[in-house]
Image (tube, rainbow, N blue to C red):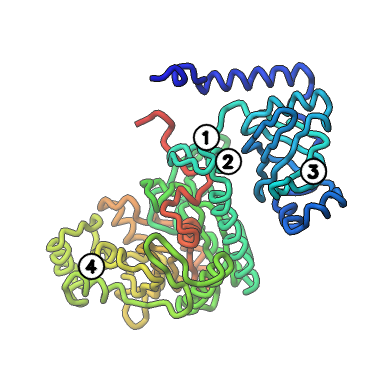
Amino acid sequence: MSSEQRISPTEDDLTATRRAKLVDLRARGVAYPNHFQPTHHAGELHGAYDTTESAALDAAKHPARVAGRVVAKRDMGKASFVVVEDVTGRIQTYLKRDRLSEEQGALARTLDLGDIIGVDGTVFRTRTGELTVEASSITLLAKCLHPLPEKWHGLTDVEIRYRKRYLDLIANGAETRQVFLSRSKVLSGIRRFLVERDYVEVETPILQTIAGGAAAKPFLTHHNTLDMDLQLRIAPELFLKRLLVGGFERVFEIGRNFRNEGISTQHNPEFTMLEFYQAYATWEDLLPLVEEMIGGLARELTGGTVVPYGEHRVDLGPGWRRMSLIDEAARAAGASPEELRDPVRARAVAERHGVGVPPGAGAGGIATALFEHFVEPELVQPTFVTGFPAEVSPLARASDADPFVCDRFELYVVGRELANGFSELNDPDDQRARFLAQVESRAAGDGEAHPMDEDYVQALEHGMPHAAGCGVGIDRLVMLLCDAPSIRDVVLFPLLRPSGKP
């Protein structure tokens, strides 16, 4: 180890030095001021003056007040060039000692990377052509007490990026921020799309006595005042359909759901879903709606309907493929559709291929397991899968032509489910029977089977018009549109195991 390496300051040394500077600022009563208000962002200045000649800038002396984080600093004796970054980009500032007060000149010499400053001055262009704000005054707005990641061009430690998203946003600002700006555009675009089609946005409970509307394990909690156990919702579906009973005809909700399940590149225990419902409609009415909505979002974000995802190019333009679950599962498993409708023969097919099936599964559950094993990973281009077995669709209307299956579809893209929709079951007696079958499945060991919800059945007994509904996974949709390999890349603060625990 060289002597230079041995005497290099540690992070603790650098933090101690920065804290000493803060102590001096506090002593002078100038720490953490809150009076500075910028008049321009970096992007605005570049947009307004990037093509303006140097002489014209010198003559006009355009005033500008900018604020941001110090991301680069170059001292030149009696002057410093300091680059600050804000939400729109970077702008260089020029801190010349003879234009600043003695106190501000001293401050300029002690600035650290990561400090947040405000600069008041005029716009000019340096001899090298760099657009710059020449400071008439500077203000240290917030002291950065810890050295930032060394590589300003990329914080690559994935664990730190997810655990300390603020560092990710600082170090990889443009790239990371763009993902979450795109996410915001997706949410606003969905709202605009549905509102234009007379859907009403509503909010339904997150704390529920019975968490229903999906096959999943809920998180449990307790309300002290009422002394009652509650569950975090796994889906808003049953409350949204209660609104159809009450007279709303088109409703939607974008909100958080919570499922006590594993964590993977596709799953986070809390995630965002869109669910929308339309009275006097069927599942077939929703397919073109979903296709139009997602294709429109792609155009809004990327300018076209062909988007890159990993090694693939996904075409979200109109004309998405459709297929039957039973037929495709049978094809992939080397069986006939008739075999997959018989529980004994279907189980034999699954055993032959070593495909595990849920406890107590009948023919429908086995056929679905075969589909998920063989077919789902192949569905790269957008594909509507139809004809889901009634057994695995406890809230969907059975097909009039074939009661073994339901009027249901799922949308698959890049090998994963993106949306799930169906014609809603509005027969209260049929719904009660479906719930009871789910209770039996739960007793047989299926911990994700749907619980009995007697209040929901009573709501149906008051009459719900025939309707169709659909849920869309917002996180997975943003992953697709932003070419993000993990759900953690599109969730600002994903759930992680506490630091230091195995």
Question: Please, what secondary structure does the residue beneath circle 4 have?
Answer: helix
Is there a contact, CB below 8 Å, between mark 2 and mark 4?
Answer: no
Residue sitting at 77 percent across and 38 percent down? 119
Which label number is shown at residue 363?
Answer: 4
Residue 135 screen position, x and y as percent: 79, 38
| Badge 3 amino acid | Arg
| Badge 2 amino acid | Ile
Please tell me which of labels 1 and 2 falls first in the chain.
1
Label 3: few (<14), some or many (≥20) within 10 Å? many
Question: Please, what secondary structure does the residue beneath circle 3 have?
Answer: strand
Q: Give the answer, above or below, for where 351 lies relative to 97.
A: below
Q: Give the answer, above or below, for where 209 lies relative to 433.
A: above
Mark 3 and mark 4: Cα distance apart in space: 69 Å
Q: Which label lies toward us, 3 or 2?
A: 3
Is there a contact, CB below 8 Å, between mark 3 and mark 2?
Answer: no
Which label number is shown at residue 170?
Answer: 2
Q: Which label lies toward us, 3 or 4?
A: 3
Q: Is residue 304 left or right of residue 328?
A: right
Q: Quadrant of the N terminus?
A: top left
Q: Give the answer, above or below, for where 251 lies relative to 357.
A: below
Residue 40 screen position, x and y as percent: 77, 48
| Badge 4 amino acid | Ala
User: Which residue position is annotated with label 1?
Assistant: 149
Q: Quadrant of the C terminus?
A: top left
Mark 3 and mark 1: Cα distance apart in space: 27 Å
User: Which residue position is annotated with label 3?
Assistant: 65
Residue 53 screen position, x and y as percent: 78, 56
Is residue 426 something that shows in the picture?
A: no
Please tell me which of labels 3 and 1 falls first in the chain.
3
Mark 1 and mark 2: Cα distance apart in space: 9 Å
Is there a contact, CB below 8 Å, between mark 1 and mark 2?
Answer: yes
